Structure formats: structure tokens, C-alpha cells
Amino acid sequence: MFKKVLFTLLTLCISEQCFALCSNCKAVVENNGGQWGNGLNSGILVLMVVPYILLVLIVLVGFKGKIREGIKNFVNS
């Protein structure tokens, strides 16, 4: 346990500052020069759309019968 804590503390103290931008966001920032904020938000939104669509589809397909049953119970109560 002590070794893990020591390793974590040393890693945090020695690590360099790094920028965690995705490739699309980085390309937008480099192309816009001084006006980096204009296209950055659009790039982030584009990258966020696909996982949310997949999540909604998985939930709808997986819980198809339970969703209908829950709506019927709600309407009838």
C-alpha cells in the first residue's frame, strides 16, 4: 500500500503538464489562430453526439417492453 501511494505522489510531482485535446479539437484550434473558441465548441459537440445516440438506442432496444409496460401502468393509474 505504501509503495502505491509513494508511486502516485512521485508521479504527480514529476509529471509534466500536458494538453488533452482530441485530434479534431486540436486541428480546429490550430487552424483558427487567435480565434480558437469559435470552432472548438462545435467540434466538441460533434464528438459528443455519437455516444449519446448509441446510448439511447441501446436503452430503447434493451428495455423496449418494459418502457411500454411502464407507460401503460402510468396511464392506467
Image (spheres, rainbow, N blue to C red):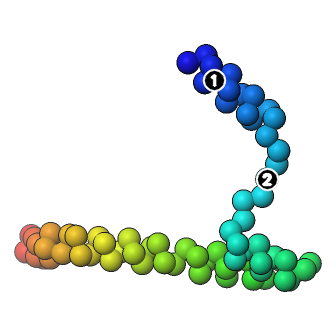
State yes or no: discs 2 and 1 in contact (Cβ < 8 Å): no
Residue placed under numbered mark 1 in the picture: 5
Task: Report the residue at 72% width, 65% height from top.
Answer: 21
Q: Is residue 14 above or below residue 57?
A: above
Count of numbered circles on the image: 2
Q: In the rendered image, which quarter is residue 11 located in?
A: top right
Can the viewer see residue 71?
no
Q: Secondary structure at mark 2?
A: loop
Q: Looking at the image, is mark 2 or mark 1 earlier in the sequence?
A: 1
- In this view, which residue lies farthest toward the top? 2
Q: Position of residue 60 (x, y in %)?
A: 26, 75
Q: Secondary structure at mark 1?
A: helix
- Amino acid type, residue under disc 2 in the picture: Cys
Q: Nearer the viewer, residue 68 or 5?
A: 5
Relative horizontal placement of residue 62, taking residue 16 as reference (left or right): left
Q: Residues within 10 Å of mark 2 (few under 14, many from 20)?
A: few
Q: Position of residue 9 (x, y in %)?
A: 71, 28
Q: Nearer the viewer, residue 62 or 6?
A: 6
Relative horizontal placement of residue 28, taking residue 76 as reference (left or right): right
Residue 68: numbered disc: none
Q: Position of residue 55 (x, y in %)?
A: 38, 71
Q: In the rendered image, which quarter is residue 36 located in?
A: bottom right
- Amino acid type, residue under disc 1 in the picture: Val
Residue placed under numbered mark 2 in the picture: 18
Task: Report the residue at 77% width, 78% height from top.
Answer: 27
Q: In the rendered image, which quarter is residue 35 located in?
A: bottom right
Task: Report the residue at 36% width, 74% height from top.
Answer: 56
Rendered-image quadrant of the N terminus: top right
> How far is mark 2 from mark 1, CA to CA?
22 Å
Rendered-image quadrant of the C terminus: bottom left
Can the viewer see residue 13?
yes
Q: Residues within 10 Å of mark 1 (few under 14, many from 20)?
A: few
